[in-house]
Image: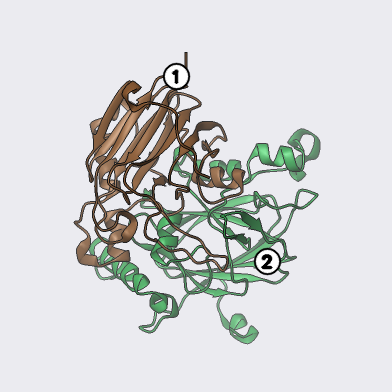
Chain colours: A brown, B green
């Protein structure tokens, strides 16, 4: 289901462009709205969420899809934590659906998927590891780097159990918007993958906007 | 494998585990672990870690995308987040095992079947998969930050075109089995608690048996290694790992 937002970007309290291959980590307060914009289209924003009050409680892909009985994320999806609490809810989306089964790219999984000699190519997990190291006041480590959401990414599952990374259903300027149900830490790796169509073989910037909670 | 061949294998250890229980062990590289659904309808939740560095753990997304599959069956390898193969599925009578639905929780058990306390029901209480993993993981210094998407052996959840998830209550049949060959030393946590989407009217307590034997060396034309080109590279990552960390064992 597509649903446009009524929020005017000019009213955002914070805006940041994340270049491909870079990360963004920031707290989003309860009631605030996080918008992620696919500026050029077909990009993948690999995203993790943590409870700010207790970062050991984090986004859980399996609990989220099981509770909604659907493997794709879209408007109305409640993003559940490992403790079964709602962290955020998707309230607007101009893409249609987002993946949360494909996981993130890592240098090691790239060796398996593509070639052993691709092990030194930049990958999402490296961005996350640098993010948690440079922001160690959050207390996050590799233990906390778990099963993520791939906003804008299209990973269709077939009835006979197939799974493929398909060309994106996203496009330039498309976005997804989430309202925080509790204070969360958002961690995004703007995917640097050069080996598959998840970002059309051409990683591009995404933009994040934060809107204040309604008064 | 014929019954005679099975009998011929030296069984290192075997036992039955009742439904709704949990256990764990470390298996050496070269071990075979056979799981048997004794009555049908079993579910075995399982997680895998490198006992020498538990930061290396089973990664369901990598396992699925590396092999372009949503289900697990014979030929599939179970990958760690470090691009290595914990184990290969060398035998499977079932055809579909789930790895995206996670574990039952106390809340799910309470809502669907009602909680039976230990105080009142002793060891017939209604344990859940999530708490089972916390208890078993705790024995090795692991906590809630270390849990990940687990395998649910014997359970099938299919996906329709619109993304809907449908649990198949007829997937696990009495006598069904799956056998894993461990390609590196692995800490195995498991439970026999119900699958979180099991619609049974009563809390299901399905017993399983498991058997541990020694695997033959992996042949050059091994089915799992050749199942996908990606698996060949996964096995090569294991070879390099053993070569560098256990000289002479590569």
Q: Secondary structure at mark 2?
A: loop
Instruction: Locate residue B227, reporting x and y percent.
Output: 42, 76
Judge the density around disc 1: few (<14), some (14-19), many (≥20) Cα neighbours within 10 Å: few
Q: In this view of the protein, which residue sits in the foreground, B9 or A201?
A: A201
Instruction: Give residue B235's position: percent from left, percent from top.
Output: 34, 70
Between B203 and A7, the residue placed more toward the observer is: A7
Is residue A166 something that shows in the picture? yes
> Where is residue B162 shown, x and y percent of the image?
57, 55
Q: Which residue is mark 1?
A: A213
Residue depicted at 36% across the width and 54% down the height: B81
CA neighbours of label 2 inside 10 A, class few (<14), some (14 to 19), many (20+): some
Question: Which mark identifies residue B171?
Answer: 2
Q: Quadrant of residue B242?
A: bottom left
Q: Extreme top residue here?
A: A215
Q: Alpha-carbon distance for marks 1 and 2?
A: 47 Å
| Image position of A161 with respect to B126: above or below | below
Q: Name the residue at 73% across, 69% down.
A: B174
- Asked whether the residues under the numbered discs 1 and 2 touch, taking CB atoms below 8 Å apart as contact, a structural biologist would say no
Which of discs 1 and 2 lies nearer the camera? The answer is 1
Spot occupied by residue B18 in the image (x, y as percentages of width and height): 71, 55
Please determine if labels 1 and 2 lie on a single subunit.
no
Which of the numbered marks, if any, corresponds to residue A186? none
Residue B100 versus residue A21 in the image, above or below: below
Q: Secondary structure at mark 1?
A: loop
The chain under label 2 reads B
The numbered mark 1 sits on a residue in which chain? A
Q: Is residue A141 visible?
A: no
């Amino acid at each position: 289901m597509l649903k446009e937002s009524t929020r005017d970007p000019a009213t955002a309290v914070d805006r940041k462009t994340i270049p491909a291959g870079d990360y963004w980590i920031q707290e989003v307060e309860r009631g605030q709205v996080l918008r992620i914009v696919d500026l050029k289209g077909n990009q993948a924003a690999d995203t993790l969420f943590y409870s700010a009050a207790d970062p050991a409680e984090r986004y859980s892909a399996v609990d989220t899809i099981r509770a909604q009985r659907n493997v794709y994320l879209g408007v109305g999806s409640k993003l559940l934590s490992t403790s079964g609490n709602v962290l955020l809810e998707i309230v607007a989306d101009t893409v249609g659906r987002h993946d949360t089964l494909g996981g993130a790219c890592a240098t090691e999984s790239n060796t398996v998927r593509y070639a052993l000699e691709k092990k030194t190519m930049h990958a999402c997990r490296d961005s996350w590891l640098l993010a948690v190291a440079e922001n160690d006041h959050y207390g996050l480590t590799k233990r906390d780097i778990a099963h993520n959401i791939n906003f804008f990414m299209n990973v269709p599952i077939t009835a006979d159990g197939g799974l493929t990374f398909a060309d994106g259903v996203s496009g330039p300027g498309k976005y997804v918007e989430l309202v925080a149900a509790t204070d969360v830490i958002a961690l995004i790796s703007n995917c640097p993958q050069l080996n598959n169509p998840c970002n059309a073989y051409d990683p591009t910037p995404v933009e994040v906007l934060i809107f204040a909670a309604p008064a | 494998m014929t019954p005679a061949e099975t009998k011929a294998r030296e069984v290192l250890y075997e036992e039955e585990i009742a439904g709704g229980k949990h256990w764990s062990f470390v298996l050496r590289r070269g071990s075979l672990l056979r799981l048997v659904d004794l009555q049908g309808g079993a579910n075995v939740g399982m997680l895998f870690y490198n006992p020498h560095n538990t930061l290396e753990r089973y990664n369901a997304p990598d396992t699925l995308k590396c092999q372009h599959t949503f289900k697990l069956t014979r030929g599939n390898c179970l990958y760690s987040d470090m691009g290595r193969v914990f184990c290969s599925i060398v035998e499977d009578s079932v055809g579909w095992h789930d790895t995206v639905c996670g574990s039952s929780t106390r809340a799910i058990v309470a809502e669907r079947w009602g909680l039976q306390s230990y105080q009142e029901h002793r060891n017939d209480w209604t344990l859940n998969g999530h708490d089972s993993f916390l208890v078993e993981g705790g024995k090795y210094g692991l906590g809630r930050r270390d849990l990940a998407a687990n395998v649910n052996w014997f359970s099938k959840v299919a996906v329709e075109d619109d993304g809907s998830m449908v649990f198949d209550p007829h997937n696990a049949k009495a006598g069904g089995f799956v056998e894993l060959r461990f390609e590196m030393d692995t800490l195995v946590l498991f439970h026999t608690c119900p699958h979180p989407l099991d619609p049974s009217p009563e809390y299901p307590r399905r017993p399983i048996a498991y058997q541990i034997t020694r695997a033959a060396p992996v042949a050059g034309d091994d089915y799992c290694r050749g199942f996908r080109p990606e698996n060949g590279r996964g096995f090569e990552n294991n070879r390099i790992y053993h070569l560098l960390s256990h000289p002479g064992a590569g």
